[in-house]
Image (cartoon, rainbow, N blue to C red):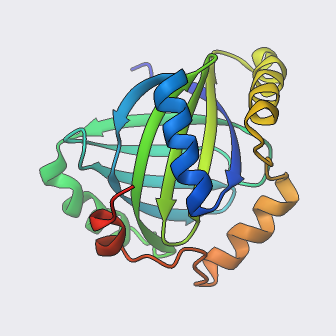
């Protein structure tokens, strides 16, 4: 059986609520809107890896993702996705917990996706990260990573986004794993907020 493997090249930037609104408006006007992507995500933190169970509310689908590298160690992640029925999300989470994956974090994501100049944007709010954006280009092999990073760097500069370094990401993730939240809105508050 052959597994699908992709390399996701990703950069992140922290933004505030005003930038969240402005960036959504700019990308809606100047890019291609790829739709709402609100989801419940469960993260299982493993040594040097990240296992994620996503129940995508907006798209009515679900998947398990294994990222073969943790956030803060480079900008490219090989990942393996397996789709499943949303109705099975709770059972899959229970299975992982019973298998001993106890370092678990939950996050609701209020998310809108866009394509702008060959870069996919996720303009997001989560309670742990607060308002932020992710820029992503999928590539087939490691040889294409440098070109993708350069493309995203140019677009980030154009939009005035300050990309987080690996060191900043590691420190930020450590704080989140310790229970710190950057965002001030709860899941219900952000779901009811009109932007």
Q: Single out the residue that lies furthest toward the left.
A: 87
In the displayed structure, 49 sits above or below 61; it is below
In this picture, residue 115 sits left or right of residue 142 = left
Residue 4 in view, yes or no: no
Q: Quadrant of the N terminus?
A: top left
Identified at 57% across, 42% down, the residue is 23
In depth, the one of 17 and 139 nearer the eye is 17
Residue 33 image offset from top left, x and y in percent: 41, 27
Residue 28 image offset from top left, x and y in percent: 46, 30
How many numbered discs, if any? 0
In depth, the one of 19 and 135 nearer the eye is 19
Residue 124 in view, yes or no: yes
In the displayed structure, 90 sits above or below 11; it is below
In the displayed structure, 43 sits above or below 177; it is above
Identified at 78% across, 64% down, the residue is 170
In the displayed structure, 179 sits above or below 183; it is below
Residue 25 image offset from top left, x and y in percent: 49, 38
In this picture, residue 162 sits left or right of residue 191 = right
In this picture, residue 79 sits left or right of residue 104 = right
Identified at 63% across, 25% down, the residue is 137
In depth, the one of 43 and 172 nearer the eye is 172
Q: Quadrant of the C terminus?
A: bottom left
């Amino acid at each position: 059986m052959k597994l699908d493997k992709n390399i996701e090249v990703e950069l992140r930037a922290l933004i505030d609520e005003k930038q969240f609104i402005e960036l959504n408006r700019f990308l809606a006007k100047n890019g291609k809107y790829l739709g709402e992507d609100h989801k419940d995500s469960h993260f299982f933190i493993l040594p040097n890896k990240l296992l994620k169970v996503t129940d995508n509310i907006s798209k009515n689908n679900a998947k398990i993702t294994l990222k073969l590298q943790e956030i803060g160690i480079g900008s490219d992640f090989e990942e393996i996705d397996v789709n499943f029925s949303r109705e099975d999300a709770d059972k899959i989470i229970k299975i992982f917990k019973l298998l001993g994956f106890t370092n678990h974090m939950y996050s609701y994501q209020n998310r809108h996706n866009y394509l702008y100049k060959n870069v996919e944007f996720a303009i997001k709010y989560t309670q742990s990260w607060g308002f932020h954006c992710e820029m992503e280009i999928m590539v087939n092999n490691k040889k294409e990573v440098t070109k993708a990073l350069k493309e995203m760097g140019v677009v980030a500069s154009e939009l005035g986004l300050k990309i987080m370094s690996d060191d900043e990401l590691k420190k930020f993730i450590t704080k989140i794993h310790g229970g710190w939240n950057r965002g001030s809105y709860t899941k219900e508050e952000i779901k009811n907020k009109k932007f």
